[in-house]
Amino acid sequence: MGQVSGSGGEIWAIPQDTGPMGMLYRKDIFDQHGIQVPTTWDEFAAAARKLHKADPDVYLTNLAANQVAAWHGLLWQAGAKPYVTSGKSDITVSVDDAVSKKLGEYWGTLAQDGVIGVEPDFTDAWYAALNKGKYATWLTGAWGPAFLSGSAKATSGKWRAAPLPQWDAAKPSSGNWGGSTTAVIRSTKNPIQAAVFAQFLNSDPTSAKMFATEQFFFPATKPLLTEASFLADAPAFYGGQKVNQVFADISAQVDPAFQWPPFLDRVATDWTETVGKSLADKTDTARALGSWQSRITTFAKSQGFTVKGG
């Protein structure tokens, strides 16, 4: 509930689903090129270079230059605290600190060296790339397995799931990409009844399971995350692997203390025009983080926030 609670302890919304990040990978491509599932980011980088050298038409992954949500998830996993709010108008912005720069240098170098893709995701070209085997992994949230099975049907049976590679293998961690809530808005005519219904909708065992099995939301309710039938699901698309179990285990490694800025839409736009652009243009991503920091800081101050860290 920490992700939907205010600084005063008030609940702003009821969690509906979550997006702990893992790695979906093409077992056939890994086997063909003798690549072991990378467990660290160093191993991941080495595999990216090895694979692209062996087959210039294939990349280990695509880090979409328009996808700030994935970047936030990777920041989260790395232990970054990009936004820390206190009170109603104080915020610390740290999107170009040491942890963020480590991430920027890592992905920026892979992009500059041309061993990962950076094309926009959720486009016709991106869907075609997944179906044709252009990308050997997709770093995605727990909603990704069901999404991929419907969007890359030509590759059924070839995919498997694993945790994200780690910066510190002794301290496994992940971050969220996505998730959703049910909230009562200010103009609701019957806010108390709406709040009670929202709580029921997302906590009742039957209702919560319906979201997980019929809508393919990854559950936010702990009872469902441990339910035997949910964890035992073994889709043929993933070669009979218990993918829900993989992501349920990952969900326990997500730090709930991560905070979001009160102007996320503007942060996302600024990321795409700075950090995302550096990935697409193969320029200095670590430097672009400074531009992102500056833009966020300027906007926050213009909205009356007291900003630290920039």
Image: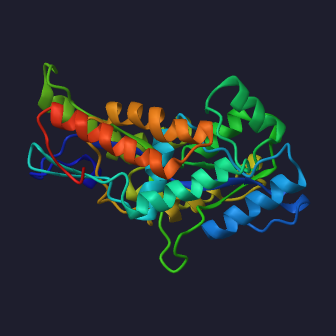
116 displayed left or right of 84: right
Left or right: residue 14 versus residue 274 is left
Q: Position of residue 269 (x, y in %)?
A: 40, 30
Residue 233 in sight: no
Is any part of residue 280 visible from this angle?
yes
**Image quadrant in which you'd find residue 123:** top right
The image position of residue 1, as x and y in percent, is 27, 53
Q: Position of residue 46 (x, y in %)?
A: 73, 65
Residue 275 vs 136, above or below: the answer is above
Q: Nearer the viewer, residue 212 or 44?
A: 44
Quadrant of the rendered structure where residue 97 is?
Answer: bottom left
Q: Looking at the image, is 267 positioned above or below residue 109?
A: above
Of residue 75 and residue 223, the one placed in the foreground of this image is 75
What is the number of callouts on the image? 0
Using the image as rendered, state which of residue 1 and residue 292 is in the foreground: 292
Instruction: Give the answer, above or below, for where 211 lies relative to 175.
Output: above
Query: In this image, 304 relative to 22: left or right?
Result: left
**Residue visible at 61% across and 36% down?**
281
Report the front residue among 164 and 286: 286
Display colour scheme: rainbow
The x, y position of residue 66, in whole percent, is 53, 34
Q: Quadrant of residue 22?
A: bottom right
Q: What residue is rendered at 73% in x and 47% in y?
A: 114
Residue occupying image coordinates x 70% and y 31%: 126
| Left or right of 260 in this view: 243 | right
